[in-house]
Every structure is written in C-alpha cells, then in structure tokens.
Image (tube, rainbow, N blue to C red):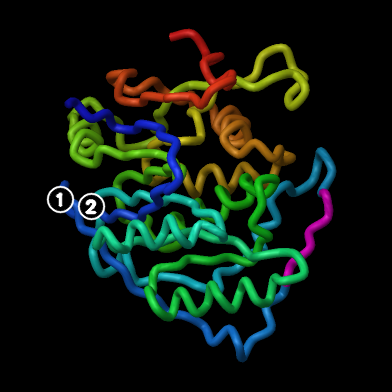
Amino acid sequence: MQWRTCVQFRCSRKWSLFVLLVGGTMCLLYSVRAPHWEDEEIEFERHEDPGPYHVAYPHKYRFILDHPEKCTQYNPFMVVIVPAALHNVESRNAIRNRTVLVLFLLGLPSGNDSKAQQRRIYEENLQHQDLLQSTFIDSYRNLTIKTMVMLEWLKDRCPQAFFAVKVDDDMLLNIKDLVRMLLNPDTPHSNYITGRVWHNNVEVYPNDVFPPYPLGMCYIMSMDLPEKILKVSKEIKPIFIEDAYIALCLERLNIAPTEPPDIDQFVVHPPPHSTIDATTPR
C-alpha cells in the first residue's frame, strides 16, 4: 500500500498530533508550562466586529497553556500543528494509548458548564502535559481566529524552523513522504504555501473571482509566511472560513499557493452527499 502525504478519513476516533522533525527524523516531544488555572479567573474576551476597513484580527489573545521552549530546545526542521476540538478527549486518549506524544491546540469552552469544562481541560493537561490553549471561544465560527493564533505561535515560538504544516484532526499524515517532498531542492523556502487548491461560493465572497487557496484540511507553508500573513491581516476584514481568509491575506501579499509536486499526495475522501469534489480544476 502506498501512503499519501495527506489523506482525509472519517471514523469514530479522530487523530490529532503535534510533530517536531529534526533533520528529517520524526521526533514527537512534549512539555508544558501550565498556569494555575484554579488560582486565575480566565477572561473570556469579547471583540467587536471591526467593520470592513479597520483592523480585522485584534491580536489580543493570549496563551493560558503554552510550550514556548519547544523550538529553542529541538531546532525542528518542520512543525506540524493540528487544531483539536475541546470535546475530543477520547480521540486524544486514543493517540496517547498508541504511545504518541502530542500537543493539541484549543480555545476556551463556552456555555453554562464552561468552568467545569475548563477544569477538566486543566486536569487533562496536568495529567498528560500536552495541551496548548488560547483565550478565544472554541467554535466553528472562530476557526479563522484559531488559525491566526496558530500563526502567532509559529511566528513567536518557532521562527527557526523551515516549514509549518497545518493538519485537521480527521487527516492521516504520511510524515516520511512529506519530508521527502520538502527536502527536494526544488521546494522553495520562502513565500511558499502548497496544498489542495479550493474555491469559495458567492454567498461568502461576492466578487467575480476569488483568490485560490489551499484546502484547510492540510497545507504546508514556509516559515516566513506566518509573520507576513499576520501583518497584512490587520488590513483585511475576516471571514469565518479560515482557509479562504488565508487566501485574502496571500492575495494582499501577492503570493499564490502552488499545487504540490504530485497532486495525488493530497487525497480527499469525502463523506456521502458531500460537495467536496467541486475543486478548482488542475
């Protein structure tokens, strides 16, 4: 069986992982500096809609669970971050049961039981020491914020890495194949982003032509892009579809995402009744 670089799958247990690659060798590591949550009242921050011509992303979120020492200690070739849903404890435990050390990117819980949820998250982190959490509400509509917070972490914590990979928690990632692709001398080390190219509909973006963007389930970028994207995001009103918002930032930067060297490295298996096959023509 030939494994692809990124393959989507659907099952009862979703995988999420954080991978550090040092010199092309996979190294799964973990560490944490956990705050005393019970001693600190977490501020559930509120940010008003900035309007179409003001600062879009407020850059006011902070990490309450963090791992700032990772990249300085291990100098990784590539960082792979997978955002995770708050309730996916079983999925996280499935990975831990497989002896894989992971880091999970989370937002804050909401609802009447938010304090109880946060206490469980804190206790889970004390037990496993592998959660990364920021002060935005964790929800589907906040996926753009989650992505931008991820970019902030990459910019501030891991600028020395060569590449960053964002992968959803329902993807299988072939690390060996991915490293082989990135070590190819033809792979750029700046202004580079690749993945399965996608489009958006007019209800979300009314212009005649929407800039191309890599499908958010799995994309790779050179490590100079997090800072550049964050900088131009100050001038662009966000939309909740996070990969499409990245496209707007890339358009402002005059950077076009590229197809991977082998399109079959990014394979999508849509669930029944899905319209996911409506991709941009190759």
Q: Quadrant of the N terminus?
A: top left
- Verify whether residue 52 appears in magenta: no
Q: Is residue 192 above or below residue 229?
A: above
Q: Position of residue 249 (x, y in %)?
A: 60, 35
Name above or below for residue 264 compared with residue 108. above
Q: Residue at x 56, y 59 (%)?
A: 87
Asked if labels 1 and 2 touch by Cβ distance under 8 angstroms, the answer is yes
CA distance separating discs 2 and 1: 5 Å
Q: In the rendering, which numbered label is found on residue 25?
A: 1
Question: Against 116, is 199 above or below?
Answer: above
> Relative to the observer, which residue lies in front, 139 or 64?
139
Does 135 sit above or below residue 8?
below
Indicate the quadrant where residue 22 lies.
bottom left
Report the residue at 23% width, 30% height from top.
Answer: 3
The percent coordinates of residue 148 (x first, y second) are 57, 50
- The residue labelled by disc 2 is 21
Question: In the rendering, at what x and y percent does residue 9 appear?
Answer: 40, 34
- Residue 246 versus residue 273: which sits nearer the camera? 273
* Most foreground residue, 274 or 221: 274
Residue drawn 50% across the image and 51% down it: 151
Q: Residue furthest bottom?
A: 39
Give the amino acid type for the residue marked by disc 2 in the picture: Leu
* Residue appearing at x 70%, y 45% in the figure: 141
Q: Which residues are magenta?
A: 44-49
Report x, y in % for residue 59: 65, 58
Residue 246 lies in what quarter of the image?
Answer: top right
Quarter of the image that includes the C terminus = top left
Q: Amino acid at mark 1?
A: Thr
